[in-house]
Image (cartoon, rainbow, N blue to C red):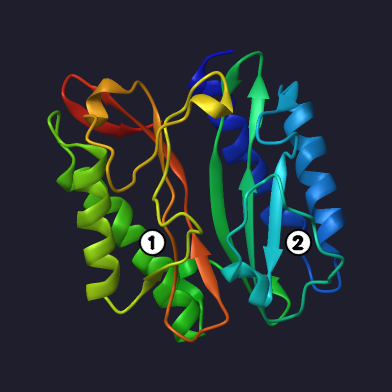
C-alpha cells in the first residue's frame, strides 16, 4: 500500500462513521466501529499509541491530549451534538492521518451547508478557510515556523483560538512517531524538505465549550502543494 491508499482508508472510514452515528450511541462503540472498518479496508495496525480512532463529543471536543494519555470516554451522543473523530490507520510503516468534526442536528448527521447552529457552522467554515490559506501561503521556501506564525495570527484575527496542547498545527509523516517534526515555533526547516506533513488546526471560540478539527496530509508535486 502507498500513502494515498492508507489515507483513503481513513477518508472512507469517516464517511462510514457519518452513516452510523446517531443519538444514544456510546463513544466507545463509535471508536470500535471505526477501528474495525479501517482493518477491513486494509489497515494492519494503528500508528498513534495503538489507537485507531480518537473520538470526542460535546464539550470534550475542546480537549487536546497526547495519545499517550487518551482514554475514550463512556458518554453517549445527543440529538444535537458535535463529534470529532481523528484516525491513525497504518499498513506496514505507511501512515494515514485524517480528522473531521461531524455535526448532528435533530438526531441526524448534517451537511455543513445545512447546519442551523451558527457557532458550529462557523467553526467548520473556519477550518476550511485555514486549509485554503495553507495552500495559498506555503511555497517551496516556506518554513514550518513561518507557517506556524501565519496561521496562528489568522486564527486570532478571525476571533478563534488554537486549542492544541503544544500550540502547533501538524507534523511530518514518518516511520517512527518519535521522529516527527512539527509546525511550531523554532522549527526553521523548510516544509518542502518533508515528503508528507499533516495540517490539523484544532480551534475554538474563546469561552466556548466546542472545538473543531480538520486534518489532511499534504505534499508537494512540481512545486505545488497538494492534498493527499
Quarter holding the N terminus? top right
**Residue 123 image offset from top left, x and y in percent:** 43, 72
Q: Residue at x 53, y 70 (%)?
A: 211
- SS at badge 2: loop
Q: Nearer the viewer, residue 59 or 166?
A: 166
Closer mark to the observer between disc 2 and disc 1: 1
Number of numbered discs visible in the structure rendering: 2
Q: Residue at x 24, y 30 (%)?
A: 189
Label 1 sits on residue: 127
Q: Quadrant of residue 199?
A: top left
Q: Residues within 10 Å of mark 1 (few under 14, many from 20)?
A: many
Q: Secondary structure at mark 1?
A: helix
Pinpoint residue 82: horizontal percent, then vertical percent: 63, 72
Residue 21's tag is 2
**Which of the two residues, 69 or 91, is positioned nearer the viewer here?**
69
Residue 94 in picture, x, y percent from top left = 57, 18
Amino acid at each position: 500500500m502507498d500513502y494515498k491508499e492508507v489515507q483513503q482508508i481513513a477518508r472512507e472510514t469517516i464517511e462510514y462513521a457519518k452513516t452510523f452515528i446517531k443519538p444514544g450511541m456510546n463513544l466507545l462503540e463509535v471508536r470500535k466501529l471505526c477501528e474495525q472498518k479501517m482493518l477491513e479496508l486494509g489497515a494492519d495496525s494503528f500508528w498513534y499509541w495503538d489507537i485507531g480512532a480518537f473520538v470526542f463529543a460535546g464539550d470534550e471536543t475542546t480537549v487536546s491530549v497526547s495519545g499517550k494519555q487518551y482514554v475514550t470516554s463512556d458518554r453517549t451522543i445527543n440529538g444535537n451534538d458535535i463529534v470529532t473523530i481523528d484516525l491513525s490507520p497504518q499498513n506496514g510503516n505507511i501512515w494515514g492521518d485524517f480528522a473531521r468534526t461531524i455535526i448532528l442536528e435533530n438526531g441526524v448527521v448534517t451537511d455543513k451547508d445545512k447546519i442551523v447552529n451558527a457557532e458550529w457552522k462557523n467553526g467548520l467554515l473556519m477550518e476550511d478557510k485555514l486549509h485554503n490559506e495553507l495552500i495559498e501561503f506555503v511555497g517551496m521556501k516556506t518554513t514550518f515556523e513561518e507557517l506556524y506564525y501565519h496561521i496562528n495570527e489568522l486564527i486570532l484575527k478571525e476571533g478563534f483560538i488554537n486549542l492544541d496542547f503544544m500550540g502547533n498545527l501538524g507534523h511530518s509523516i514518518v516511520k517512527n512517531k518519535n521522529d516527527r517534526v512539527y509546525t511550531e515555533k523554532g522549527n526553521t526547516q523548510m516544509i518542502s524538505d518533508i515528503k508528507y506533513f499533516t495540517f490539523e488546526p484544532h480551534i475554538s471560540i474563546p469561552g466556548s465549550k466546542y472545538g473543531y478539527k480538520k486534518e489532511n496530509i499534504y505534499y508537494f508535486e512540481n512545486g505545488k502543494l497538494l492534498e493527499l
